[in-house]
Image (cartoon, rainbow, N blue to C red):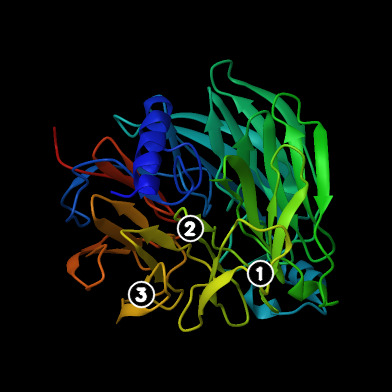
C-alpha cells in the first residue's frame, strides 16, 4: 500500500470509530470503505435482512449512519394543477423534463440499523410554491452530514437545518435563496466549526460557510467571473472535497467553467483551473495524493487530472492529463489501486491509469446510472436506476463478480456498515447481508 493509501486507511478507521458513514461518500468523501465481508450476491428474496418503506415521500439523498441509526432526508409533495404547471414552466428550458409541486414538506427520518424500524420522522421545513425540479432530481437530493448527534440537513434554496438527535430538537434553521433551475444537488460538508454550502445557482454563484452551532454566516466567497451569461450554463451541483497538500488543507469545489481550491477556514482562493464550458457539474472530486480528479459536466464531460500544488490560475501549468470519452455527468469517480474508475450516466464503465490517463478497459453495464460507486475490499459496487447493482473487481483488467437485482430505482449511493450494505430505492431502504 502506498503512503496515501495507508494514511487514508488510518483516517477512515478513526472516522468509523465514531460514525461508520457520516456524509455523502463516506468518512473521507471519496466512496471508499474499510468494511470487510460485504455481501456479494442478493436479490429481492435472498440476502435481505430488512426492507423498510420510506413513508416520508421521496428523495435521492444517500443515508448516513451513526450510533446504530440510519438517517435520511425525504420530501412529500402536493402536486400542482395543470394550470399551475403551465404557468410555472412558461418560457423555461426543458419544461417537459421538469416536475412542479404546489407545496412540499421536507423530512428527516431515523431508522434503527438493527431492526429497520422507523424510530423518528421529523418535519423540518414546509415550502409553498417551490421551484420546479428536473424529473431525475428530487426535493431532497443533498445528503445530510452527521457529527456528535447533530444532523445537518441541506435542501438548497428551501433551507438548511441543524437537528440535535440527542435532544430531539431543531437547533437552528437558515436559508440562502438560490435559483437552482432544476432543484438542489450539492451536499453540505463540515470543516472544524463550519458548515460549508456550495451555492452555484443560475442567478448567483458563491460558496458560503456558516457557524455549525448557530447557523450564522462566517464567510462568503463569490465564484470567479464566468464567460457564459445565460444562467442555465452558470449553475452547478458539486460537493466540496477537503484534501491535504504540503501540510495545509484545501477545499476543492468544481463549478461552471472553473475548478477552484479554497482555504476552508477563510474562503480565500488558492488556485483555479479553467476547465472549459462545462456546467451543471454533479460528481464530487476525488484525490489520490498526486492528482485531484474532476468531471467537467455538461454538455460533454471530460475527466481532468489536476496537480493541487500551485497558486493562482494554474490552467496551463498544472493539468496532468485529460480523458474525454464516456465520462459521467452525475455519478462521481473512484480512485483506488492506482486507477480511476467511472460509470457514466448511460452505463459505460471505464478504468484509466491514475498517473497517465491511459485507458485500461471499457465495458457497458445495463441501464442508466445516477448513483456514485462504492469501493470496498477490492470490489466496486455500482447501482443503476432499475435496481441492479453490478459488482466488479477494482483492477486494470475487467472482472465481473456479480449482478444483483432488486425492485425500484436506485438513485442514492450505496452505504456499507457492519459488513452489510444499505441501498435506498425510491420507495424503500434495504439492509443487505448475511443472517447472524
Instruction: Tell which tag, 2 or 3, sits nearer the viewer.
Output: 2
- Asked if residue 366 lies left or right of residue 404, the reply is right
Residue 384 located left or right of residue 302: left
Q: Residues within 10 Å of mark 2 (few under 14, many from 20)?
A: some
Q: Residue at x 68, y 28 (%)?
A: 193
**Label 1: few (<14), some or many (≥20) within 10 Å?**
many
Residue 289: image location, x then y, percent: 46, 53
User: Reading the chain from its start, which is encountered first: label 2 or label 3?
Assistant: 2
Q: Position of residue 138 (x, y in %)?
A: 59, 58
Q: Which residue is mark 2?
A: 290
Q: Nearer the viewer, residue 424 or 67?
A: 67
Looking at the rendered structure, which numbered label has been put on residue 8? Answer: none
Q: CA distance from mark 1 to mark 2?
A: 26 Å
Q: Which residue is mark 3?
A: 349
From the viewer's perspective, tell me whether residue 57 is left or right of residue 17. right
The picture quadrant where one finds residue 309 is bottom right
Residue positioned 36% across, 71% down in the render: 353
Asked which secondary structure carries label 2, the reply is loop
> Which tag, 3 or 1, sits closer to the chain's start?
1
Q: Position of residue 64 (x, y in %)?
A: 46, 39
**Is residue 373 visible in this depiction of the protein?**
no
What is the quadrant of residue 213 in the picture?
top right
Amino acid at each position: 500500500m502506498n503512503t496515501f493509501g495507508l494514511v487514508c486507511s488510518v483516517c477512515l478507521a478513526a472516522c468509523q470509530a465514531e460514525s461508520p458513514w457520516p456524509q455523502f461518500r463516506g468518512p473521507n468523501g471519496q466512496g471508499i470503505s474499510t468494511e470487510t465481508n460485504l455481501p456479494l450476491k442478493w436479490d429481492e428474496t435472498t440476502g435481505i435482512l430488512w426492507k423498510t418503506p420510506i413513508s416520508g415521500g421521496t428523495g435521492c439523498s444517500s443515508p448516513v449512519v451513526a450510533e446504530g441509526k440510519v438517517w435520511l432526508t425525504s420530501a412529500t409533495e402536493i402536486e400542482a394543477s395543470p394550470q399551475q404547471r403551465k404557468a410555472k414552466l412558461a418560457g423555461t428550458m426543458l419544461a417537459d423534463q421538469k416536475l412542479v409541486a404546489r407545496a412540499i414538506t421536507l423530512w428527516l427520518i431515523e431508522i434503527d440499523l438493527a431492526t429497520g424500524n422507523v424510530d423518528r420522522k421529523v418535519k423540518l421545513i414546509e415550502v409553498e410554491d417551490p421551484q420546479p425540479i428536473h424529473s431525475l432530481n428530487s426535493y431532497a437530493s443533498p445528503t445530510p452530514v452527521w457529527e456528535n448527534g447533530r444532523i445537518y440537513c441541506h435542501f438548497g434554496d428551501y433551507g438548511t437545518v441543524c437537528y440535535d438527535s440527542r435532544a430531539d430538537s431543531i437547533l437552528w434553521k437558515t436559508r440562502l435563496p438560490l435559483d437552482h433551475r432544476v432543484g438542489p444537488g450539492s451536499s453540505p460538508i463540515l470543516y472544524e466549526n463550519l458548515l460549508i454550502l456550495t451555492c452555484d445557482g443560475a442567478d448567483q454563484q458563491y460558496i458560503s460557510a456558516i457557524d455549525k452551532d448557530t447557523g450564522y454566516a462566517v464567510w462568503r466567497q463569490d465564484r470567479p467571473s464566468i464567460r457564459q451569461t445565460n444562467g442555465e450554463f452558470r449553475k452547478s451541483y458539486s460537493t466540496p472535497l477537503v484534501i491535504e497538500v504540503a501540510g495545509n488543507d484545501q477545499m476543492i469545489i468544481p463549478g461552471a467553467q472553473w475548478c477552484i481550491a479554497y482555504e476552508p477556514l477563510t474562503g480565500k482562493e488558492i488556485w483555479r483551473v479553467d476547465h472549459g464550458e462545462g456546467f451543471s457539474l454533479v460528481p464530487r472530486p476525488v484525490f489520490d495524493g498526486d492528482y485531484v480528479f474532476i468531471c467537467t459536466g455538461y454538455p460533454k464531460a471530460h475527466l481532468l487530472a489536476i496537480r493541487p500544488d500551485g497558486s493562482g490560475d494554474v490552467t496551463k501549468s498544472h493539468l496532468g492529463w485529460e480523458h474525454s470519452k464516456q465520462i459521467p455527468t452525475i455519478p462521481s469517480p473512484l480512485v483506488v489501486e492506482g486507477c480511476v474508475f467511472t460509470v457514466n450516466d448511460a452505463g459505460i464503465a471505464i478504468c484509466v491509469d491514475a498517473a497517465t490517463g491511459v485507458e485500461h478497459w471499457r465495458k457497458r453495464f445495463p441501464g442508466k446510472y445516477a448513483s456514485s460507486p462504492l469501493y470496498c475490499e477490492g470490489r466496486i459496487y455500482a447501482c443503476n436506476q432499475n435496481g441492479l447493482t453490478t459488482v466488479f473487481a477494482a483492477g486494470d483488467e475487467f472482472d465481473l463478480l456479480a449482478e444483483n437485482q432488486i425492485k425500484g430505482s436506485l438513485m442514492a449511493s450505496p452505504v456499507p456498515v457492519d459488513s452489510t450494505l444499505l441501498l435506498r430505492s425510491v420507495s424503500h431502504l434495504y439492509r443487505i447481508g448475511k443472517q447472524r
